[in-house]
Amino acid sequence: MTQLIINIEDTSLLTELKQAIKMLRGVGTVSVIEHQTESAASEITLQAMKDAQSGNTVKCVDFEDYLRQVK
């Protein structure tokens, strides 16, 4: 089965869009999944992503060097 994902900004159109999609030949089911607008990432993860983007990372020569640095 193949899925088609459509992002809808105006949720007032949801009912009409579902009905229209169901009328298309070959459509099995239409499911609605609501996504949260806020990030599920923790503050620690968000800070790590910011650090990586700004180049604030640890440079290691090899795996042994990495193990020494993370102790």
Image: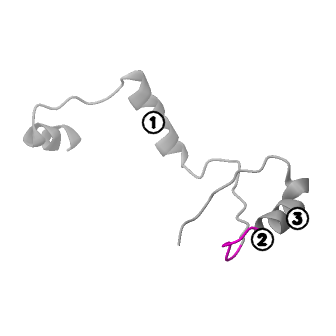
Instruction: Give the residue at x 31% y 29%.
Output: 57
The circle drawn on residue 64 is none
Q: Are marks 2 and 3 in contact (CB under 8 Å)?
A: no
Q: Amino acid at mark 1?
A: Met
State the residue position of label 2: 22
In the rendered image, residue 9, in percent from the top left (x then y), is placed at 80, 46
Q: Is 27 drawn above or below residue 44 in the view shown? A: below
Which is more toward the observer, 6 or 39?
6
Residue at point 73%, 66% (across, down)? 32
Most frequent secondary structure within the magenta stretch: loop
Front: mark 2 or 3: 2
Instruction: Classify mark 3: helix, strand or loop.
Output: helix
Amino acid type indicated by mark 3 = Thr
Q: How is the image coloured?
A: one colour
Magenta segment: does it hold 25? yes
| Residue 18 screen position, x and y as percent | 81, 65
Residue assigned mark 1: 49
In the image, what residue occupies the spot 11% across and 37% down?
65
Which residue lies under the disc numbered 3?
A: 15
Number of marks in picture: 3
Of residues 41 and 3, which is closer to you in this image? 3
Q: Badge 1: few (under 14), some or many (20 or more) residues near its Cα, within 10 Å? A: few
How many residues crowd around disc 2 within 10 Å: few (fewer than 14), some, or many (20 or more)?
some
Whether residue 66 sits left or right of residue 40 in the image: it is: left
